[in-house]
Amino acid sequence: CYRVMGRDPAQGLPSFEQVAEDVYPDDRARVVESFEKALREGTDWEAEYRRVNSDTGVRTVRSLGHPIRDHSGRVIEYIGTVMDITEQRRADEEREEHLWFLECMDRINRAMQRTNEVESMTSGVLEEARAIFGSDRAWLLYPCDPEAQTCRAVMEHTDPDYPGALVFGQEIPVDAETAESLRDVLQATGAVADRIPAKLRHRFNILSTIAVAVRPKGDNPYLFGLHQCSHLRSWSAVERRLFEEIGRRLEDALASALAHRDLLASEDALRTSEERFRILVDQATDSIFLYDEDGIVLDVNRQACESLGYAREELIGMRTCEIDYDVTAERTLQIKQRLIQDGNATFHGRRKRKDGSHFPVEVRARAFNRGERLFAIALATDITDRKRREQRMLAQFGVTRTLSETGSLEEAGPRILREMCEALDLDCAAFWRVDSNSCTLVCVQTWPLTTNAETGNVSASGAGGFATGLSGKVWSSGEPVWISDLALGSEFQRTEIAAKEGLRAAFAFPITFKNDVLGVIEFFSREVRDADHDLLQMLNSIASQVGQFIERLRAEDALRSAREKLAHATRMATVAELSASIAHEINQPLQSVVANAQACRRWLVATPPNIEKARLSSDSIVRDGYAAADVISRIRALFKRTAPAKVDLDVNKLILQICELMDDEIHANSIFLETRLANDVPMIRADAVQIQQVIVNLVRNAIESLSVTTGQKKFLLIRSRHDGENVVVDIHDEGAGLVDIEKIFEPFTTTKEEGMGMGLAISRSIVEAHAGSIWVVHNDVRGVTFSFSLPTKRSDAM
């Protein structure tokens, strides 16, 4: 608790006010109000809030409190726990930001896929961007070139309340200040916020802005930006990242659309000049293919040859099935029908290189007729980088969604493996968890579920998964391991199962929380894969999420177990305390009965018998019997929750009666007794028998402490005094004293070899039931002084 609350244990327990001051100002009133309400109602308390400390900064914590009650049902204390959930809340926020990021990118992708026409596509992207960020203007400027004489707005969308800052198509002079702003954006590694010439800021009422350079292949850079006119705003990290990703997608789309438009515009030139066509297409940054109606390649550009690894002469005459990895007769027929009906088609596929490797492409095809023959021009864009980004986003989204929807590792494990394998095009996976008791790795999940994975326990240096020693290596080192090809031979070798399945590439990464390795996840592919640093970075993020998920489950199980143990211990303590209380309370009058009965027998057998003293002893037996009966009656009243039978009581008279009652014990131990009873002590309202039990117990403890004292005078003082609205009774002895007075009133705490440790606990319960208090202090010389206070009759009435 000290660590979580940012407190130094050496400074002692903080006060409630100090604890409340550390609560984040926005949360303080709510937390204090909820805690005070729980105190008033005696109910459980739970709150989640932020704490701020100069050493730990702002941390999010979750506190739980449970009321503990005494025998009368009154709440005497709260017991609870405080947990630091900063990382969990941070992970939740990151998950929400990530989901928002994916949803926004989905909107942008749909806007791009609605049309192949450059202006319509650009307009849709700008309108979606303005809506996503809630900005007042979204615009696209061309060219973003500080050396150009002029630039112009090629597209702009605005809020009706804030008209356009730029006239569409109008040339804008690039002065020195504007050129400096364009240069800043071009040199920046990402988006640039709030850098705009002062004259433009005032002229067009711009309070905040963000811009990024868009560099489509084969063209000059564009400047893509947003204006905020209604209010000042700061752009968060996730907003910047989203804005930059929209810029990259716009960059890809513009490159493809512009190239496609240029290609279509060149059809007329193709009819008049094959040479001009060759120059044009060879300068394109995307692959261009010319097909006949049977799917045979008639011509290609230079980029197509470079991307596939063939010479132009080798590609001409090839059929689609020879370079398209996913082609089927059915798919070829569908694309051909779309070209005939719509004149164009856009689809995704994988192209096969001459060396056998393949890569993803986005193909935009357009059909045209020459004479009676059908031809098609296809523009193939390598989307490897984009595909990787989308796959990683999809994998992160799948894991995040799984962790938010499941409540156990058994439920989440197979879903995590499936989501990641499907998103990243992997063939199988295994989930290993560290068993801290046996210090082994245990394979708890595989995917597909029918795969013949090697499951069971392995030591840190043993074999696991489809590659010998891979999971153990990751566990022992705490670092990810990537194997591009298991078949090439290294410290990790393919197992027989892996060889039979045809698995080649493998990589594994640790599931960690703070500095502890909680498990290992392995992935395998039938294709050779080179190490991907960006993918490992993403996997580290996922590993952190899974680690926090496992640790949260562990913390929840521990909390649930602690609550169950606390409830069981409370019940056992209550039974034990009650049993000891009954035994202790009845034992005192029964001892007196036995002592008086033995005295009576001695007087009767004396020569001659002393009938008078025997009669007095028998009267004492009757008196002590009634006292035992009173104790039993009060125990029965306790079970019935009957209030103490309070009467007007003179404390001084009660003390004198007790001194007379215990005179034999005092003289038998050679104790000098002194009473100092104040004359101004008022009457109190109390249960006489219970208060008598308290004083008797304290006096008897003092006698027992003095009985072991040797070589010194045994002195016992009983004092009464009036202190404000209370009557105070002190029992002062100069005996052996106490070692630990902090715990002396707790049940089962005793300094006697045969003691039960219930006398002082019962005395405290009786005093507190009468709205009083009891305490003990060390004397200056030796011994201790026990004191208790009870409200006067007047204050009790008030």
Image: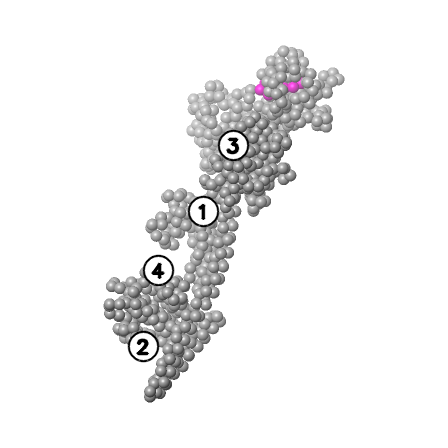
Any part of residue 131 in sight: no
Determine whether label 3 and label 2 are within 8 Å by CB: no
Residue 576 falls left or right of residue 375: left
Sequence-wise, the earlier of marks 2 and 1 is 1
Which residue is identified by label 1? 84
- The amino acid type, in three-letter code, at marker 4 is Glu
- Residue 288: say if magenta: yes
- Residue 248: say if magenta: no
Which range is magenta? 284-290
Residue at 49%, 48% (x, y): give it.
555
Binning the other alpha carbons within 10 Å of mark 3 as few (below 14), some (14 to 19) or many (20 upward) gives some
For discs 1 and 3, the disc positioned in front in the rendered view: 3
For discs 2 and 1, the disc positioned in front in the rendered view: 2
Where is residue 626 drawn, in percent x and y? Answer: 42, 79
Sequence-wise, the earlier of marks 1 and 3 is 1
For discs 1 and 4, the disc positioned in front in the rendered view: 4
Which residue is identified by label 4? 742
Binning the other alpha carbons within 10 Å of mark 1 as few (below 14), some (14 to 19) or many (20 upward) gives some
Binning the other alpha carbons within 10 Å of mark 2 as few (below 14), some (14 to 19) or many (20 upward) gives few
Which residue is identified by label 2? 664
